[in-house]
Amino acid sequence: MILNNGTLVAVTDGESLRLFHNKGHEPHLDLIEVEDSVLEVAHAGSGGRHRSSTANPDESRLGEDDFAASIASYLNHKAHEKACEHILVIADPRTLGEMRRHYQPSLSAKLVGEIAKDFVKHSVISIKSAIETA
């Protein structure tokens, strides 16, 4: 995958978020990590607030869903305020699915791709390699 200069890359796993800006000019990638990931965790995940049981998700899962919703809200805000023109999301499949439920049209229009893999604890080189092979 070739990313435009200035593309925002969000890498998450439901517990943490890493943000990068691509400072490279096409077709080269130069991912620079940014410390702009201050999130207010929303309580808007799937499922109600029921006791944990085999039929209901546990608190950990609800927390991950809330975190995914917060990331989607953050990216929606970035897309809406026109802070970036291109956005790539890299997340584990479950988090990515929860995030998609919260995408607004302005974010969907700026998405250049999604990679359904957990790379949040990987090096920048590994993330760059995953993008290049996608």
Image (spheres, rainbow, N blue to C red):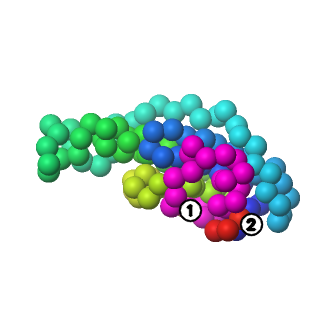
Q: Residue at 66% x, 46% y: name it.
A: 123
Give the residue type at disc 2: Ile
Helix, strand or loop under label 1: strand
Name the foreground residue: 131 vs 89: 131
Describe residue 71's horizontal placement relative to residue 2 as left or right: left
Q: Residue 22: where, in percent of width, then height?
A: 76, 51
Q: Few, some or many C-alpha atoms within 10 Å of disc 2 (few <14, some 14-19, many ≥20)?
A: some
Q: What segment carries the magenta color?
A: 109-131
Residue 57 visible within the image: yes
Helix, strand or loop under label 2: loop
Q: Which residue is mark 2?
A: 2
Describe residue 48's horizontal placement relative to residue 131 as left or right: left
Q: Residue 75: where, in percent of width, then height?
A: 56, 47
Q: Farthest residue in the right direction?
A: 25
Q: Which residue is mark 1?
A: 114
Q: CA distance from mark 1 to mark 2?
A: 13 Å
Instruction: Check the picture and name the quadrant holding the N terminus.
Output: bottom right
Describe residue 70's horizontal placement relative to residue 85 as left or right: left
Q: Residue 85: within the magenta?
A: no
State whether residue 28 is above or below residue 46.
below
Give the residue type at disc 1: Glu
The answer to which image quadrant residue 83 occupies is top right
Rendered image: mark on residue 36: none
